[in-house]
Amino acid sequence: MAIPSFSVEGQHVLISGGCGGIGSAFARAFLANGASVTVTDLHPPAQALLDAGARFELLDVTSDDAVNALAAKIDRLNVVIHCAGKLIRWEEHKPEVFRQIVDIHLFGNVRLAAAFRPHLKASRGCLINIASMFSYFGAAHVPAYAAAKTGVVGLTRSLALAYVEDGIRVNAIAPGWIETEISRPGRENPEFNARLMQRLPEKRWAQPDELAGTAIFLASPASALINGVTIPVDGGYSIA
Ligand SMILES: NC(=O)c1ccc[n+]([C@@H]2O[C@H](COP(=O)([O-])OP(=O)(O)OC[C@H]3O[C@@H](n4cnc5c(N)ncnc54)[C@H](O)[C@@H]3O)[C@@H](O)[C@H]2O)c1
């Protein structure tokens, strides 16, 4: 009988938006489990993340050149996690803002996937994308964000089928309601918050660390048969 391994020891993991709330939590979890981690973002991480052993590379995921230059610099990679994200409440109805948001979430995802496909092929590694509850539900206040996150689910399925010939798995995590900077305006809006709490089974915002186990699992050999899916990690919000 094969004993499942949940180990990510020795893997090299690259995280876009890796200095944000969820990206940093992923970085800490992979480092604690014996992986090496490169976080990339528009700004440096907290000193504690560097002290824990993370490397940092400045990277704007909307730049083809920057993504390709970073890919040329890195030779060994097992996991790419696309955590970079932004939303602009109510402004995304303007086409130029819509384009900017989709560029980060969806085109950024494709840029990273294309640039690092050779690395992941060499390591038989995996890509982990980040979806959202707005992959499933409409969002009048962030239409570009919701459209991009819905696209991430389809992109995840399609890249999984395309990359299977290279031995690369592609999955996504759809976080529920997580306490980070991007969700601050929602948390601080009493009306929005009250509606949310009514539906959330545990009636609480979650911490970024609560998503990390799923990322570790998706990067580990134990999930070798899981491909092309988006896993909601939402405390039951989407089934309530
Ligand atoms: N927090 C939540 O409740 C929640 C829920 C569902 C999905 N998500 C998604 O999780 C991911 C991580 O978000 P978070 O909650 O950690 O938010 P966050 O604001 O803490 O982190 C987002 C990070 O992305 C970086 N970023 C923005 N634009 C970038 C660009 N052009 N290039 C590179 N980096 C860029 C920011 O600098 C920031 O560090 C995002 O894709 C977000 O949409 C978050």
Image (cartoon, rainbow, N blue to C red):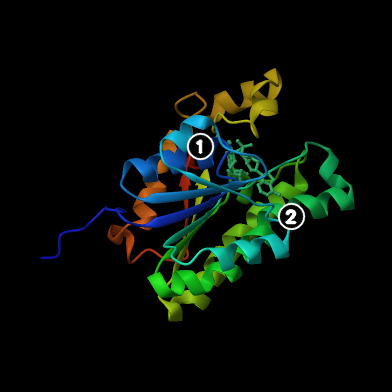
Query: For the residue marked with disc 2, what is the amino acid?
Result: Val
Q: Amino acid at mark 1?
A: Tyr
Q: Tell me what residue is drawn at x 55 percent, y 44 percent.
A: 18
Residue 4 spot, x, y in % from top left: 20, 58
Circle 1 is placed at which residue position?
237
In the figure, 99 relative to 154: above or below? above
Question: Is residue 63 shown above or below 36?
Answer: below
Percent x, y of residue 52: 41, 36
Front-lying residue, 186 or 70: 70
Q: Residue furthest left?
A: 1
Residue 185, image quadrant: top right
Q: Residue placed farthest to the top in the image?
A: 190
Question: Is 137 left or right of 35, judged from the image as shown?
Answer: right
**Would residue 200 appear left or right of 138 to someone viewing this image?**
left
Q: Quadrant of residue 121?
A: bottom left
The percent position of residue 44, horizontal first and vertical second, equals 61, 39
Residue bearing the label numbered 2: 102
Ligand 1 within 8 Å of disc 2? The answer is no
Q: Quadrant of the N terminus?
A: bottom left
Tell me if residue 113 can be seen.
no
Residue 80 image offset from top left, x and y in percent: 50, 58
